[in-house]
Image (spheres, helix red, strand yellow):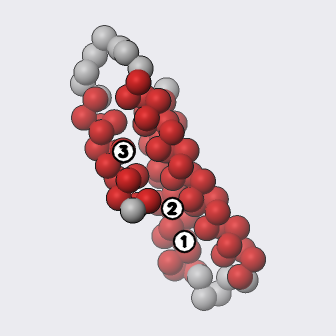
C-alpha cells in the first residue's frame, strides 16, 4: 500500500508540475502559489510513503529496487 500511495502522490506531483509549466502565465498569482504548495506537498508525501515502504519487512524483495528508484527521483526533484 505504501508503494501504491507513493506512486500516486508522485504522479499527482508530476501532473501539477506540467500544468504549472503550461499555464503559469494565464493563472492568477494566488492560484500559482496554491498549486506550487500542493505540488510540493505531494512530493513530500511520496517521499514519506517510499521511506515507509523501505522500512517494512516483507517476504518479497521484487519491488525493493522500485522503492530505491523512486526515493532517488524524489531526492532529485527536492534537490
Give the CA distance from mark 2 to mark 3.
18 Å
Pointers 1 and 2 in contact (C-beta within 8 Å): yes
Q: Nearer the viewer, residue 64 or 15?
A: 64
State the residue position of label 1. Answer: 19
Is the residue marked by circle 2 packed among few (<14), some (14-19), or many (20+) residues within 10 Å?
few
**Residue sticking out furthest to the top:** 59
**Mark 1 and 3 residues: CB-CB less than 8 Å, in contact?**
no
Q: Position of residue 29 (x, y in %)?
A: 71, 82
Q: Is residue 31 above or below residue 74?
A: below
Reading the image, the residue beneath label 2 is 15
The residue nearer to you, when weighing 34 against 22, is 34
Residue picked out by circle 3: 71
Viewer can see residue 8: no
What SS does tag 2 mark? helix
Query: For the point 51% across and 61% down, which residue is it?
Result: 15
x and y, in percent, of residue 46 in the image: 49, 44
Q: Residue at x 35, y 45 (%)?
A: 70
Amino acid at each position: 500500500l505504501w508503494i501504491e500511495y507513493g506512486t500516486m502522490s508522485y504522479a499527482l506531483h508530476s501532473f501539477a508540475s506540467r500544468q504549472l509549466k503550461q499555464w503559469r502565465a494565464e493563472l492568477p498569482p494566488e492560484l500559482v502559489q496554491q498549486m506550487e504548495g500542493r505540488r510540493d506537498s505531494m512530493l513530500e508525501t511520496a517521499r514519506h510513503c517510499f521511506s515507509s515502504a523501505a522500512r517494512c519487512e516483507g517476504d518479497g524483495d521484487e519491488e525493493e529496487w522500485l522503492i530505491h528508484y523512486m526515493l532517488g527521483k524524489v531526492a532529485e526533484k527536492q534537490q
